[in-house]
Amino acid sequence: MNEEPKQIKQEKKESNLKTDKVEAIVGFAFLNEKKDSLVSLAVEDEKIKPEAATHAIIENKITPINFSVTKPESESSNGRQTSHNFSNNGGTFFSLKEQIKEGDFALIVNQKFIDQNQILPFKKINKETNEQIKLKIAKHYNRKISQSSTLAELNNKAQINITLFEVKNDSALAVLTYLHNDQLITLDFPAKYDEMSTWRVDDGGVFDFENLQLLSIFQSDKSIKIATVFWGAEGYNLNFYESVDGVFKNIAEAYGYSAPL
């Protein structure tokens, strides 16, 4: 059975995606094994108009795409949104105009999105958050930290960290933070602690930092935006967030089923 991901208590999505060519649009897709094609994922039951998507952003890099076909899921599909089942999936298919070597997921966007959002280069790392930053995060939440790691460092010296706080009664909390000088932007993952399933189905009550991965980071005139993938036992969530008043708001989301056969 498909995993019904535990509801992550975040802010309600701010606005529906725009599919008019004059508006900036963003959708999600996953790549095939050869990494020369991609297929869209449904975004809250909305469909991206094929003619509106002109580029894919993969591993924080822009590449042009061509619309191929829109088709329903085949009868031979195993129901999984994975590269192994790529050709059997239903959705809108695109080909990549340039060869890429890495990346499993893509944002599909139009020229307006590219014009309005500057990609911020970053380096993926995995190290313990330094004490000064941990103290700042702990003070902001008035809560004791159990574990904290730096996930990325940007060229502008900003950092993205993931922090897990100690459980209070049955209240569990993990937080992703963007910190640049005195600017702090937060993304909360609150949950009711359960030794079997807390944040995701069958997570064993553990927030595995490796399961939350950064895909892309952007800066516009008004905000910082990030794209992430959050893996669970049977599937993954793709999210696009925008900062509003120091908090990342969920703008768009898609889910893919990927349980092992």
Image (cartoon, rainbow, N blue to C red):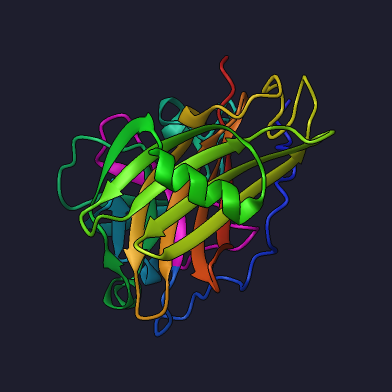
Q: Identify whether 50 is placed above or below 125.
A: below
Instruction: Judge left or right: residue 165 versus residue 147.
Output: right
Residue range highlighted in magenta: 26-49
Question: x, y (%) of residue 25?
Answer: 44, 71
Residue 36: within the magenta?
Answer: yes
Instruction: Judge left or right: residue 171 versus residue 69.
Output: right
Question: x, y (%) of residue 210?
Answer: 46, 28
Q: Residue at x 84, y 33 (%)?
A: 169
Question: x, y (%) of residue 19?
Answer: 49, 75
Question: x, y (%) of residue 65?
Answer: 26, 57
Q: Quadrant of residue 67?
A: bottom left
Is residue 71 visible in the rendered structure shown here?
Answer: no
Q: Identify whether 248 is placed above or below 227.
A: below
Q: Quadrant of the C terminus?
A: top right
Q: Nearer the viewer, residue 62 or 141?
A: 141
Is residue 11 visible in the rendered structure shown here?
Answer: yes
Residue most toward the left?
Answer: 98
Instruction: Judge left or right: residue 142 versus residue 91.
Output: right
Residue most toward the right?
Answer: 169
Q: Residue at x 80, y 26 (%)?
A: 194
Q: Nearer the viewer, residue 97 or 251?
A: 251
Q: Quadrant of the N terminus?
A: top right
Q: Identify whether 196 is placed above or below 85.
A: above
Q: Identify whether 184 is placed above or below 205.
A: below
Q: Residue at x 30, y 43 (%)?
A: 37
Residue 40: within the magenta?
Answer: yes
Q: Quadrant of residue 126?
A: top left
Count all numbered tags in the image, as a single digit.
0
Instruction: Judge left or right: residue 87 versus residue 112.
Output: right
